[in-house]
Image (cartoon, rainbow, N blue to C red):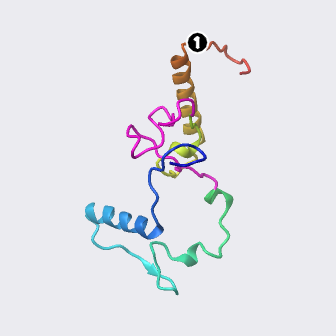
Amino acid sequence: MDPFTGMKKVATVSVEEEASLIHDLLESAGFTTLLAWVDEGGHPHLIPRNLFVGNRIPLAGVAHQNGTIRFGNDAATSALDANCRAHEVDNLYVVDGSFFPSSGAVNPALTIMANAIRVGDHLLERLGATSVVTAGAMV
């Protein structure tokens, strides 16, 4: 249990454990050979480090940070429920890009906004409130 948030940790794994999990997942999906590079220290990488280390990455290459908080129906394997509410904190909702499983190939801004509106509608329903917004009105 985290003393600051009062929430239990879902999982903590090392980089090596995560790499092993990814390897096992790909192997179970039928991949028998993975292309990998080995750096000077003998550490394998799926992408050669010289493609990104020491090179300037444009802002567009790093601007869509998301996928940091897993969501699902099981509190043992996720931090948020399907309505982006924390399993263990009744009044905590997360409506930014964190709920994504990972980053997609396109800008996630519209999906984030649509999800925030969806969660807002859920909150209105949960609170028994109604919302009337006229076209062109400032909210």
Element under disc 1: loop
Q: Nearer the viewer, residue 19 or 61?
A: 19
Q: Amino acid at mark 1?
A: Thr
Q: Is residue 7 left or right of residue 138?
A: left
Q: Is residue 37 left or right of residue 28?
A: right
Q: Position of residue 8 (x, y in %)?
A: 48, 46
Q: Position of residue 33 (x, y in %)?
A: 31, 74
Count the labels in the image. 1
Compared with residue 108, is residue 127 higher up or lower down, i.e. above or below?
above
Q: Position of residue 43 (x, y in %)?
A: 47, 80
Which residue corresponds to the image point at 67% horizontal and 13% vertical from the top-left? 134
Which quarter of the picture shows residue 54?
bottom right
Which residues, given as a range, are shown in magenta? 63-92
Which residue corresponds to the image point at 68% horizontal and 70% vertical from the top-left? 56
Which quarter of the picture shows residue 71?
top left
Compared with residue 67, is residue 120 higher up or lower down, i.e. above or below?
above
Quadrant showing the C terminus: top right
Mark 1 crowd level (few <14, some 14–19, many ≥20, 10 Å Cα)? few
Compared with residue 125, is residue 87 higher up or lower down, i.e. above or below?
below
Compared with residue 124, is residue 9 higher up or lower down, i.e. above or below?
below
Residue 87 part of the magenta-drawn span: yes
Q: Magenta span: helix, strand or loop, mainly?
A: loop
Q: Position of residue 92 (x, y in %)?
A: 57, 34
Circle 1 sits on which residue?
Answer: 130
Residue 112 part of the magenta-drawn span: no
The extreme right residue here reads: 138
Which residue corresponds to the image point at 51% horizontal and 47% vertical from the top-left? 69
The extreme bottom residue here reads: 40
